[in-house]
Image: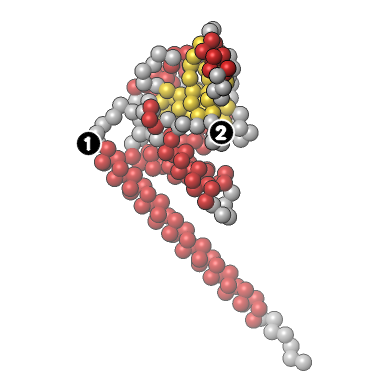
Amino acid sequence: MPEPDIVARPVARATELEELRWEIDRIDNALLALMDRRIATAHAVAAAKQSAPSRWLNLRPDREAGVIDRLSTRAEAMPEASVRAIWRELIGLNLQAQRRMEVVLHAGARPALVASAARQRFGGGAPVVVADCAAEALDRARGRDAVAVIELSPLSGWWVALAEDPDLVIFEGLRDSGGALVALAVGRIAPDCLPARERYAIIGEGSLRQRAVAGEPIRAIAMSGHLRLCVTRTEAAR
């Protein structure tokens, strides 16, 4: 009986492995080229917008949420959470390519947690500034290309300053890995760019009661005097 070929099999497996590694390298190169192309397109978008300057930030939370939701449902092998994390980072890079935007943090009790949530939301390329107080964070968001990310607790009252503010709006809640709300993102967001599935409102206790009785999905998340900071979330909210 002829002796088994103990050399041929490992060579064949090694060749196959090298081919697979080559394929991964080819895919990586293609991915990088596409991401570079996306950044270049963001620069082109910024150039097109220069002819029509706006007082609003270059942020479209509604569109971002729609893009991420659409892609996360199309993924076959990748976990949904991974798709969301990757595209959050990619969108953040594109936004910075269009126009530099600061993320101004204020978190007295849990700074590391709030900073982590802000990084996940706005990407690692966003310049971060730490504010000594909530009022400072809001002032920077009011007068610069910046968003304020401010820690929230049920008894915090910094948001009262937004009740009569014509420009600043709470446009998103930032959550920890368990889904608990830890901070709010505030900025000069155009009204038609706010995500429909989650809206924040500052109203009186009586108005909150009336809207809840009418069946609106609204709840208070903080209170200060007679005012209530409320959130409404639709069934489509994730």
Mark 1 or 2, nearer chain start: 1
Position of residue 39 relative to residue 10, above or below, is above
Q: Are marks 1 and 2 in contact (CB under 8 Å)?
A: no
Q: Position of residue 9 (x, y in %)?
A: 66, 78
**Left/right of residue 195 with respect to residue 58 in the rendered view:** right
Q: Amino acid at mark 2?
A: Glu
Label 2 CA crowd tier, 10 Å (few <14, some 14–19, many 20+) = few
**Mark 1, mark 2: which one is toward the viewer?**
2
Residue 111 visible? The answer is no
Front residue (pair 192, 17): 192
Q: Name the residue beneath numbered marker 1.
A: 51
Q: Quadrant of residue 127?
A: top left
Q: Amino acid at mark 1?
A: Ser
Front residue (pair 83, 111): 83
* Marker disc for residue 155: none
Q: Quadrant of residue 137?
A: top left
Q: Position of residue 138 (x, y in %)?
A: 42, 20
Secondary structure under the numbered disc 1 in the rendered image: loop
Q: Position of residue 40 (x, y in %)?
A: 33, 48
**Left/right of residue 26 with respect to residue 238 in the rendered view:** left
Colour convention of the picture:
secondary structure
Label 1 CA crowd tier, 10 Å (few <14, some 14–19, many 20+) = few
In whole angstroms, how far apart are the C-alphas of marks 1 and 2?
Answer: 39 Å
Please name the residue shown 50% across and 32% down the image. Answer: 197
Please name the residue shown 54% across and 23% down the image. Answer: 216
Position of residue 17 relative to residue 160, above or below, is below
Please name the residue shown 49% across and 48% down the image. Answer: 71
Q: Name the residue beneath numbered marker 2.
A: 235
Please name the residue shown 53% across and 70% down the image. Answer: 19
Q: Position of residue 78 (x, y in %)?
A: 57, 52
Q: Quadrant of residue 58?
A: top left
